[in-house]
Image (spheres, rainbow, N blue to C red):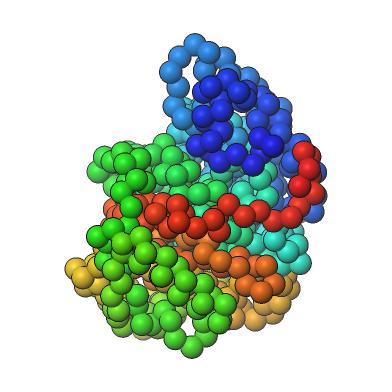
């Protein structure tokens, strides 16, 4: 069953000639045709282009030494610009937008020989924790199709969990890679802010947004990071530091690592099955040689209010460009320019996006900027200082990724605050600009996945990959699959 292969296993099969890129791509496309009508994981499928890219990859492999991603079928979250292929951001306002250029990550994947199968469903403009704000309808969790796969990168996570592709790219502004990874038993890596270029990635909150990956294991996360990391002169926030070779970190093991357990992440509100799975994960890593230490991150409680001032403020600025004038949805028969703006935006944006634009405009307005936005930036600095202090004592920090397992679709759509609390353990990482990794670490009694989160220091992706690989060698949670019908059996 080629669709079940990891990126690394598929690369080996392609290199040995046991499998062709066309065969692998066709297996994934057949899987998409069978399951996407139920899961709604992909908004756009580029089958014809993908098969052409796969054929080109096979010819390239016969002629030259090639990068490991050559011929590997991947999916992009639908906010990465793709030249000639529509990029909707999950919104009506961009429903028919076809970019004239590629995002840097798109360009780098093409240069590496990857096959792009299509664009993944997502919360509108990446604003959501359940993939229910998408104009194209909610994505469903492969482990239970009545439940959310998480958000905003829910389509990317569901596509990987259901073996529609070998791996996927997502973005993480407050947990949008790590939270869906936890809810779907996939591996989600959010790199350090600036480690992967944001050029051509449609912005939500520019100081928080970060591209990353959803994969079947840590080895695959390292392979994608290797292909994508590095300075980009087109992105002013891109870090001008060469990316190391991430491969050796995978074999170092957990021996000698000191792992921090923050008191603030293990209090009330953490579901009992999640707490039990985290305890078992700690014991596994201790057997692998790691030492654990209790630490404190005292400003953790300020994460949600700080984030929901800063992120909407930046969104209100970034989304001002969608006004019906140059591109995107344009209302019919406007009376004047003001009417064009008002009706185009009211028709084009969904309720959650409108809510965040209004909140962001409010906190930036005269008389409120100092009381809200400036104060939130000061608290953000305190949160970052907490982590800096902690990393003087420990190598990596272990926490839950989410407080509970996947909730039912529709369960929280009427309660925005409860929805926002789904990201309570992930938001601080974005505010501090740090790398985070979510790994499967168990299942609850209903068979729903549980995730653990590893947090590293700035540019500390190597220690995250080292710790995550050691954990996955000692466990098989990441290898378990949801019971789905499809081509080539279950």
Q: Position of residue 208 (x, y in %)?
A: 41, 61
User: In the image shown, does 313 or 200 lie closer to the viewer?
Assistant: 200
Question: Who's the residue at 71% across and 77% down the image?
Answer: 411
Residue 302 picture quarter: bottom left
Residue drawn at (68%, 26%) of the image: 23
Name the residue located 60 percent from the left edge and 39 percent from the top edge: 5
Give above or below for 234 relative to 64: below
Count of marks placed on residues: 0
407 w.r.t. 55: above or below: below
Instruction: From the viewer's side, name the closer residue of 275 and 165.
Output: 275
Rendering coords of residue 22 (x, y %): 66, 24
Q: In this rendering, would 337 be left or right of 103?
A: right
Pick whichever, 363 or 192, lies toward us.
192
Where does residue 432 sit, x and y in percent of width and height? 33, 66
Q: Tell which residue pokes out farthest to the top in this image.
A: 63
Q: Quadrant of residue 429?
A: bottom left
Q: Relative to 162, say whether 453 is above or below.
A: below
238 left or right of 452 in image: left
Q: Of residues 2 and 233, which is closer to you in this image? A: 2
Query: x%, y% of residue 54?
Result: 62, 24
Is residue 173 shown to the viewer in this render? yes
The furthest residue to the front: 287
Task: Assign the N terminus to one quadrant of the image.
Answer: top right
Q: Residue at x 61, y 48 (%)?
A: 160
Residue positioned most to the left? 392
Residue 343 visible to an observer of this rendering? no
- Residue 284: name its quadrant: bottom left
């Amino acid at each position: 069953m080629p669709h079940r292969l990891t990126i690394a296993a598929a690369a080996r099969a392609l290199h040995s000639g046991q499998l062709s890129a066309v065969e692998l791509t066709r297996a994934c496309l057949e899987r998409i045709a069978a399951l996407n009508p139920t899961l709604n994981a992909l908004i756009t499928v580029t089958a014809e282009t993908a098969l052409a890219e796969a054929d080109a990859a096979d010819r390239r492999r016969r002629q030259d030494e090639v990068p490991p991603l050559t011929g590997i079928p991947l999916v992009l979250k639908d906010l990465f610009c793709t030249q000639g292929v529509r990029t909707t951001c999950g919104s009506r306002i961009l429903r028919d937008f076809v970019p004239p250029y590629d995002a840097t990550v798109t360009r780098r994947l093409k240069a590496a020989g990857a096959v792009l199968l299509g664009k993944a469903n997502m919360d509108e403009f990446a604003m959501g924790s359940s993939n229910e704000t998408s104009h194209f309808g909610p994505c469903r969790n492969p482990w239970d199709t009545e439940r959310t796969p998480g958000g905003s990168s829910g389509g990317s996570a569901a596509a990987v969990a259901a073996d529609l592709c070998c791996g996927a790219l997502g973005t993480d502004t407050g947990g949008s890679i790590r939270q869906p990874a936890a809810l779907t038993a996939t591996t989600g890596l959010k790199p350090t802010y600036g480690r992967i270029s944001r050029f051509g990635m449609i912005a939500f909150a520019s100081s928080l947004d970060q591209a990353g990956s959803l994969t079947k294991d840590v080895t695959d996360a390292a392979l994608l990071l290797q292909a994508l990391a590095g300075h980009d002169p087109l992105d002013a926030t891109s870090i001008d530091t060469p990316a190391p070779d991430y491969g050796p970190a995978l074999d170092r093991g957990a021996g000698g690592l000191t792992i921090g357990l923050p008191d603030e992440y293990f209090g009330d509100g953490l579901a009992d099955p999640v707490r039990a799975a985290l305890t078992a994960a700690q014991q596994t890593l201790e057997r692998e040689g790691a030492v654990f230490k209790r630490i404190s991150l005292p400003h953790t409680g300020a994460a949600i209010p700080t984030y929901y001032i800063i992120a909407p403020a930046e969104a209100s600025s970034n989304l001002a460009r969608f006004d019906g004038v140059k591109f995107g949805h344009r209302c019919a028969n406007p009376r004047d320019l003001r009417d064009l703006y008002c009706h185009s935006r009211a028709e084009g944006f969904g309720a959650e996006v409108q809510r965040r634009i209004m909140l962001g405009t409010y906190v930036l307005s005269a008389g409120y900027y100092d009381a809200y936005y400036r104060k939130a930036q000061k608290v953000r600095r305190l949160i970052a200082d907490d982590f800096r202090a902690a990393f003087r004592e420990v190598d990596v920090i272990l926490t839950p990724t989410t407080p509970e397992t996947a909730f039912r679709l529709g369960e929280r759509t009427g309660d925005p605050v409860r929805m926002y609390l789904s990201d309570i353990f992930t938001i601080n990482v974005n505010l501090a600009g740090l790398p985070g990794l979510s790994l499967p670490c168990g299942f609850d009694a209903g068979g729903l996945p549980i995730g653990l989160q590893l947090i590293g220091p700035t540019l500390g992706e190597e220690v995250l990959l080292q710790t995550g690989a050691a954990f996955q060698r000692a466990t098989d949670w990441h290898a378990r699959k949801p019971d789905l019908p499809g081509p080539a059996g279950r």
